[in-house]
Amino acid sequence: MPTKNADAIQALTRRLLQEIGEDPRRQGLLKTPGRVAKAYRDLTRGYAQDVRQVLNGAIFDEAYDEMVLIKDIDVYSLCEHHLLPFFGKCHVAYIPNGRIVGLSKIPRLVDVFARRLQVQERMTSQIANCLKEALDPLGVAVIIEAVHLCMMMRGVEKQNATCVTSTMLGVFRSDRGTRMEFMNLVGRR
């Protein structure tokens, strides 16, 4: 994060502390504005990342035509409505059509979209559409299961509510058997 942005976030944090009734000069809060600036740099690093660069050099020609699944990818993001975290697991599958992607690139791709202010629904479709565009596979499937602190700590205060979103493209949408194979592999029936 450029120094100008870090300085602005620190000033805003000091002001926020004052507005909620705290003293930003209190010993325990003296370094908080700097910590918040560093945290937001990390939590929103996806804005500075280009998915083409993340996938660059890791797409390969391969005749493999069975499902490729990376499941239980940890996801941490910020709700754009309240700036509170939501977190959970992401499951991503695709069926190659002559091209595959390096396996480590899929969790990296998930992080690019997760490390932005988000709604879970949009993030789910962004991941799927990005893989579709990059690989032109026979199909892509993405499921995200997450808990949202905006629902747990405020508002409805529901501690055990999990949001599940899915995007099914290509054969995952049109072929029930393929979709069911994916659902069985990720443990959702």
Image (tube, grey):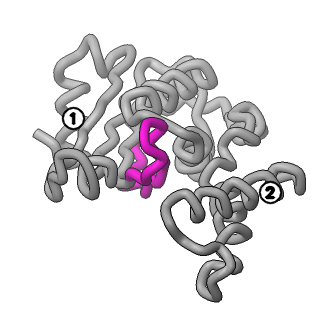
Q: Amino acid at mark 2?
A: Ala
Characterize the local packing of mark 2: few (<14), some (14-19) or many (20 or more) Cα atoms within 10 angstroms. some
Q: Tell me: residue 20, above or below residue 140.
A: below
Residue 43: percent from left, percent from top: 60, 54
Q: Quadrant of residue 100?
A: top right
Residue 68: percent from left, percent from top: 42, 40
Q: Which residues are magenta?
A: 68-86
Residue 76: percent from left, percent from top: 47, 54
Q: Which residue is mark 1?
A: 181
Q: Is residue 58 visible?
A: no
Is 11 one of the magenta-colored residues?
no
Residue 125: percent from left, percent from top: 44, 25
Secondary structure mostly seen in the magenta stretch: strand
| Label disc, if present, on residue 99 of the rendered structure | none
Outermost residue toward the left? Answer: 189
Question: Which image quarter holds the C terminus?
Answer: top left
